[in-house]
Image (tube, grey):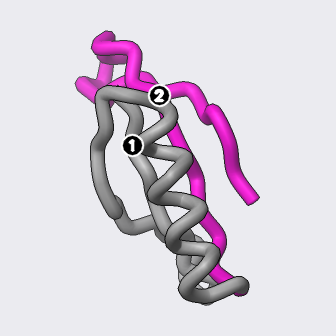
Amino acid sequence: MYQVYVKDKETLSKDLVGEYADADDAFDKADELVAQDSSVKYVIEKTSGKFNSYGDLLTDIVAQN
């Protein structure tokens, strides 16, 4: 599963935009966000389906701008 987030410049938080089963769909969504506003910063993460000892879902960053 791929998750697309938009990063907030001021608070350093990130907001989930969508979850996609296919990486191409996630990249298409990120490209769409940048086309709407060139100052948008995004992160695409891939979830592994595994959790750490705190119960947090483990993810790997696939792409970011």
The residue that appears at 49% across and 68% down in the rendered structure is 6
Residue 8 drawn above or below residue 56: below
Q: Which residue is mark 1?
A: 3
* Magenta run includes residue 42: yes
Q: Secondary structure at mark 2?
A: strand
In the foreground, 61 or 54: 61
Residue 4 drawn above or below residue 49: below
Kind of residue at badge 2: Lys
User: Residue lying furthest right in this view?
Assistant: 65
Answer few, some or many: residues within 10 Å of disc 2's Cα (few below 14, many 20 plus, some between 14 and 19): many
Q: Earlier in the sequence, mark 1 or mark 2?
A: 1
Q: Which residue is mark 2?
A: 46
How many numbered badges does the structure rendering display?
A: 2
Question: What is the span of residues highlighted in magenta in the rendered image?
Answer: 39-65
The residue that appears at 34% across and 63% down in the rendered structure is 17
Q: Specify the quadrant that holds the C terminus.
A: bottom right
